[in-house]
Amino acid sequence: MMSDTAFADLEIRILAQQADGYPVELTVNQEQQYARGYLPAGFLPWQAGASPQEDGERLFGWLTADSRLKSAWAEVRGAQPRRRVRLRIDAAAPELHSVPWEMLREPAADGGLPIDLAASSATPFSRYLAGRWLPGSPVLKRPIKILVAIANPFDLAAQGLAAIDIEEEMALLRAATAGFAAQVELAEALQPCTLASLEAALRTGCHVLHFVGHGGFSAEDAVALLVMADEANRSVFVTDAEFSAMLGRQLGDAAVGDDDKLRLVFLASCQTATRSPADAFRGFAPGLVAAGAPAVLAMQDLVPAVTAQEFARTFYRQLLTHGLVDLAANEARSGLLTARLPAAAVPVLFNRLRSGELLSQPGKITGDREEMVWPVPLQNVDQGLCTAFLGPQVTEGLLPSTGELAEKLAERYGYPLTDRRDLVHVAQFMAVNDPDLLRNDYLRLLQRSLPGYLGVAPTDEQKRQLRDATFTQTAEALNWAEAVLGVQENELHHLLADLPLPLYVTTNPDSFMFEALRQRGRSPRRVGPRWEQPQAGSPQWVLTPAPSRQAPVVFHLNGHDADDEQRKRLVLSEDDYLAHFVRLSRDQESFLPMNMLRMLSEHSFLFLGYQLEDWAFRAVLQGLIRPIAQTNRGKKMHVGVQLDVGQAADVERARKYLARYLDQFNIDVYWGTPRQFVGELHNRWQSYAKAGNDGWG
């Protein structure tokens, strides 16, 4: 399945109306924010014209009417031709959801062609609904369960509505998923399709709910409605609040495993409704997302049956191919335009997934002990005999990458060589002149980037208060542990904090693991190495009290920013790493706490977010792990996650080489992302714990 990292992240945030209009903010990759512009309020209410293409360009002209927004858009388009477009309309401006944003059409520029933003494979488009709840991880389990609910009460004609051909709808979905028979399970909800029977079907576990039925809107009560059935198969109007409450109960049902939770709701309506279902589904979709559904597809207006069916057919085929829900929706709209079918902009995706990743593939394990990779960590986690090592990639989507940080430092200080994305080399260049400046500027870059990655716009007063704050102080002031749940749906540190580990070792300076543990009600401590050699005769260094499950230790092996001594010794440059390797390999017993070393000799390890060429990983591997592996060879099994091979000419041979190399350290490799691994570990741990902590049920 496709990686979401193929796209830059462009968030268009529209705020509640002010005197100058609707404020609009453009942010790229949660960090680069452009000057605020305004949408003229007089453009509303939206009036459709004779041509969807002309309407789309008129809508785009309104979005970029402010010269600041027009300039920012041109800059983003030039720098990021492949960009995930997330339209974030604030809850205080619900009237903007009535605008058909899926029509947005960027006019031709520089001799190119016009771009339909919601129908281009280069610009996956969704209406992003932010919120501080955790929608869960992408679906890893197979088969992917699609529950099909078709509401076809016998008295639809009495309501002025046409009957729905159940077999035709099922045949459509069978055809759409035909190429993925081994991966997909289609299940039809029992007839009659009542709210209670649908709830019971959902309780058995499903990943996608595909609902076919009629919708409406009660102007008198100002509520959206779905036409469902009662036990006698007579028409019953179900309000959006009732439907959302039922869905919320299913999503919160502890009896349904996380890997069986609902991920997508597809609301398909028929063309023969006597009134437009626009209000009904616009009201339904955000409500379902608020109830906890990570993604909802709905129809914002009347749609011909042939259009709805062709959209669904292409959407499911593409979603099952690459797993990205927003890209699949764009590809389905593109198919409608190619086939010259009407109403291509009617399907709307309301989304809570910043990455768009709805489906994913389980990671692949290498090594001769594949069958033991899950039982061993689960047992060790249960016994408190497991340590997680956190590397640079675990902060992906939360902070700039090391390459991005290196480029900014290289630009600012005139780095003269070509490897400007190599942080260790750029840091070495800076350290030669001023090592204190290096550390201060590195931490300042992290600190200044944090609000953007959290989607937070600090007030002027907050900016003044945080001007001289450390990274740790800023994370605490912005309530990172809560705020990040509205940013990353499968946040790795929080999932790790759920595991009863006594010790977490990180080579990153951030406070994320510490904050996640506190948010989970545990009592963590942050500790770093003892950088200065003790005097002769000094007592051994021991962590007191010893790390425990309730009071775990987050050990910052390369230093951190919450202590002056740790900050001054932060390991960044080549010289830093060489000296660090010597300390780790030669002076372990004075450099690290003795009871921590004893724990490491008894634990299995999870290496998360490293690549083989990372200096931090090489120092840990050669300086710390090699002596332990030599002592405990054959006794402890470790797992390395995404220790990837980069741009190898022969990936399979490179992976085999890497597996053989790491075998000397008893490390088996999980080929997948850190979030995939931790999400799967977390799900398995929940099942393991429910089974009585022995794995036998």
Image (tube, grey):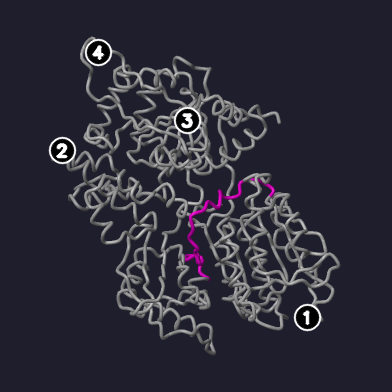
Say which label, 3 or 1, has the lower sequence index: 1
Instruction: Report, in whole angstroms, how far the alpha carbon at label 2 lies from the one at label 4.
Output: 34 Å
> In the rendered image, which residue does mark 3 sit on?
550
Residue 256 drawn above or below residue 663: below
> In the rendered image, which residue does mark 4 sit on?
538
> In the rendered image, which residue does mark 2 sit on?
432
- Determine crowd level at label 4: few under 14, some 14-19, many 20+ residues with C-alpha closer than 10 A: few
Say which label, 1 or 4, has the lower sequence index: 1
Q: Secondary structure at mark 3?
A: loop
Instruction: Give percent across and percent down for residue 519.
Output: 45, 42
Three-letter code, disc 4:
Ser
Magenta segment, which residues?
119-143
Q: Residue at (35%, 51%) from the top-left corner?
A: 478
* 120 left or right, relative to 555: right
> In the rendered image, which residue does mark 1 sit on?
159
Give the camera-side residue of 457 and 417.
457
Of the residues tagged 1 and 2, which is closer to the observer? Answer: 1
- Determine crowd level at label 3: few under 14, some 14-19, many 20+ residues with C-alpha closer than 10 A: some
Instruction: Report, in whole angstroms, how far the alpha carbon at label 4 lies from the one at label 3.
Output: 30 Å
